[in-house]
Image (spheres, coloured by chain):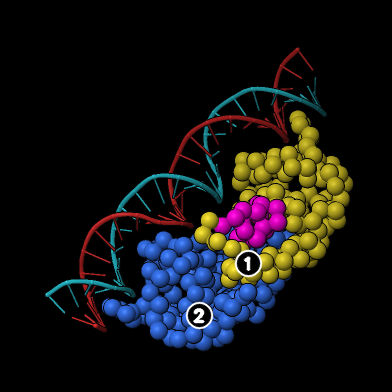
Chain colours: A yellow, B blue, C red, D cyan
DNA sequence: CTTAAAACCTAGTAAACCGATAGGATTATA
DNA sequence: TATAATCCTATCGGTTTACTAGGTTTTAAG
């Protein structure tokens, strides 16, 4: 299940991407428009800034803006930062690999092979979609 | 992330499927062989029985056995029972649909469309794989 | 220079969920 | 009758989630 954090984060990025001018967008504006608790959203936007998706400007007239072009931002990258691994099981994760304690050998594990397929399918979808694609979805 | 419950459940089903004879398999045997806490496993097997995947026999020489043939058991069904929805967001779930509170309209939601694609990709993989397929994975 | 508006930061917290564990009740076989 | 198995209920510590509170700092405008 996708956490609210990730969901809100994606919505916020999409909202910012939809503004053609590059003026900073305030958290309060996104919060109202997307029905997200402002304080919670602030922490998410902060995280997105620290991980290099957003820039920010403090003070009056400040806000958040995209650092890269929307079509350069793959959804895999966004989800990995906000949610963590895309794989459903750590032993199959490319970026967050962890060995299972119970499995003596991954190659004979019935779950492993299945989850590799699921991971690849998801990775395929999320890698093909950019922020541009999802922001302007009708 | 897949819960341990689901992971253990799949492993247990695969273990049972691998036995050619249809004699009941004991929880203790599976627990030892697959390194799963026995009590925890018991509760999972019970759930799999109640949801129609397994039959059971009590008393000496008892245990659990498959009710259907392994190639008739789709992994979608197993995961839905043990884990719940396959979709990453309730508003996109076929079997566990729930409306989002924050979204005024799903059709204009940037997350929605993306998650439909992810769901379909996962559904595709999990629907094509049966217990037979994963049990006898090299 | 003051005020207001914004991001930034730290901490805490209620509720839910997870992965068990405990302790037995029930049932069937030998 | 003893034993081996499933079945059932309850509990529990730990972690995560989704916030909330309460401020500090920076900046622009008046």
Quarter-wise, where is residue A130 in the image?
bottom right
* Front tag of 2 and 1: 1
Q: Quadrant of the C terminus of chain A?
A: bottom right
Residue at 43% across, 86% down: B22
Which residue lies at the image location 51% right of the left edge and 87% below the top edge?
B69
Would you place residue A102 above or below residue B94 in this image? above
Identify the disc placed on residue B17: 2
Front one among B102 and B79: B79
Q: Tell me residue A109's x, y (percent).
A: 58, 68
Please identify the quarter of the rendering in which residue B107 is found.
Answer: bottom right
Q: Position of residue A101 (x, y in %)?
A: 53, 56
Residue B35: x %, y % from top left? 46, 62
Nearer to us in this view, B37 or A72: B37
Direction from residue B69 to residue B44 in the image, left or right? left
Q: Can I make out residue A35 in this image? A: no
**Relative to residue A109, is residue A95 depicted above or below?**
above
Find out whether residue B107 is within the magenta segment: no
Instruction: Report the Cα–Cα distance between label 2 and label 1.
Output: 18 Å
Q: Which residues are magenta?
A: A84-100
Element under disc 1: helix
Q: Which mark is residue B101?
A: none
Quadrant that contains the N terminus of chain A: bottom right
Find residue B124 and report its horizontal and vertical position in percent. 68, 76
* Residue A89 on the magenta segment: yes
Name the subunit of mark 2: B
In the rendered image, which residue does mark 1 sit on? A107
Residue B69 at least partly seen = yes
Question: For mark 2, does the 10 Å Cα neighbourhood hold few (<14), some (14 to 19), or many (20 or more) residues?
Answer: many
Q: Residue at position x 60%, y 69% from top?
A: A108
Q: Nearer the viewer, residue B28 or A20?
A: B28
Q: How many marks?
A: 2
> Image check: B65 left or right of A33?
left
């Amino acid at each position: 299940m996708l956490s609210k954090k990730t969901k809100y984060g994606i919505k916020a990025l999409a909202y910012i991407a939809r503004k053609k001018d590059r003026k900073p967008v305030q958290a309060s504006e996104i919060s109202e428009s997307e029905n997200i608790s402002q304080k919670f959203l602030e922490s998410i936007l902060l995280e997105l800034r620290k991980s290099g998706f957003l820039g920010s400007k403090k003070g009056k007239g400040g806000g958040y803006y995209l650092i890269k072009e929307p079509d350069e931002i793959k959804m895999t990258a966004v989800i990995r930062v906000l949610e963590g691994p895309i794989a459903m099981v750590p032993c199959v994760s490319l970026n967050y690999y962890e060995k299972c304690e119970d499995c003596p050998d991954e190659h004979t594990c019935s779950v492993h092979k299945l989850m590799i397929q699921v991971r690849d399918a998801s990775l395929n979808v999320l890698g093909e979609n950019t922020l541009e694609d999802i922001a302007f979805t009708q």
